[in-house]
Amino acid sequence: MKIINIEEELLSEGHPHPVKIDKLDEIYGRENCGLKIYDSLVVDKRYYIHDLVETAKIQNIFAHYGFAPRVYDVVKVLINGEVKYAQVVEVIEGERGAKNTKYEEARDKISQYALKRGFYNRDYDPSNFIDDKYVDFGGWKFPENYKEQVQELVGTPPYQNIPELGIDGPRENKERFDRYNLDDIFWGGKTVLDVGCNYGTLCHEVHRRGAKRVIGIDTPSMIDSASEITQYLGHFNVDMDPVTIQRDDASNLSRLDIKEFDVVFHLSVHKYFGLPQGVIDRCKNTLYLEIRNHEKVDEDCLDKNFKSVNKSEIYDDYGPRILYTCKK
């Protein structure tokens, strides 16, 4: 858990009003970051229990569908030496309470989704909405069968391992991560793009290793499941974005809020859309390019765009593959 030292006096404490803290924008690679501050990680509100980690997960699941602002982390905060806990949140502005004309429509959408998935919630008071976003998930809980619901999001047979969910796929994570030499990179502060992220296993790993921002892209149907899995597992500052790339055309990457990534993974997706120049242009430092051994890569293009290109021997990982590690 991160420890954030705040020297200035914070005037607002607890939900539903976060405090904007400028230095958080740099830490999390975001804009408009703030803190919701509490005395402990689990807060007894007399009528309900507010678990900061559980409610952060739930809020982000709703945020994926535009129903709520994001939570980027749960942290320990030192305020002039006093220990508190906080959710790092997206600070939004808009109408609240009786003046909020978007409240009823937003309430109906959120309540329908909550009912569908079995979430336990307290209420939908208008004061807990800013425009069409619900901002106070205090007291919300996962249903008892929620882990099983998340497991069912994974296709059969699964393509990747997700050990936290007890899911075994044909591609073994540790062997893959060792092959990619992830230990050779200091991940702290890095921005990472995973093209064709599947359910986000690699995104989770580099986030766990300290990457500042991680974005995984894949098809819309895959991304909905990947986002829910990612947030359920607590990878709060990982984005799952339904960006589609056409063969030799990565213009859709322009919708991402990061223009250059320190590290780009382009693994086993070459057969679908090649390696567009737009992907190469988004790479600031290191590109991992994995192909099946029968596929052809324009190695002259790699040599032109990167200072060094290391090509591995053929290895077997759910079929024979080759890895290019390219550095600018």
Image (cartoon, rainbow, N blue to C red):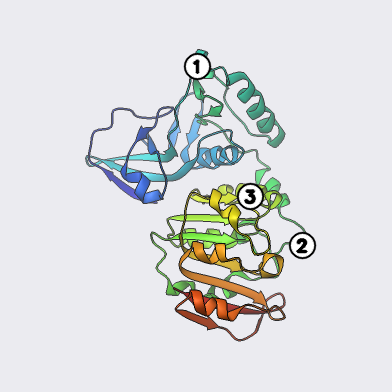
- Residue 131, compared with residue 5, is above or below; it is above
Q: Secondary structure at mark 2?
A: loop
Which residue, given by chain and number where applicable, does mark 3 sit on?
242
Q: Residue at x 61, y 68 (%)?
A: 275
Q: Earlier in the sequence, mark 2 or mark 3?
A: 2
Judging by the rendered image, the residue that carries numbered circle 1 is 97
**Residue under circle 2?**
157
Q: Which mark is residue 42?
A: none
Judging depth in this view, the residue of 41 and 316 nearest the camera is: 316
Q: Quadrant of residue 271?
A: bottom right
What secondary structure is found at the residue carrying circle 3? loop
Could one spot residue 41 in this view of the protein? no
Distance Cα–Cα, label 1 vs label 3:
33 Å
Q: Specify the amino acid type for callout 2.
A: Pro
User: Residue type at mark 1?
Assistant: Gly
Q: Position of residue 287 (x, y in %)?
A: 51, 70
Which numbered disc, 1 or 2, marks the residue closer to the eye?
1
Q: Quadrant of the C terminus?
A: bottom left
On the question of residue 145 being in view, the answer is yes
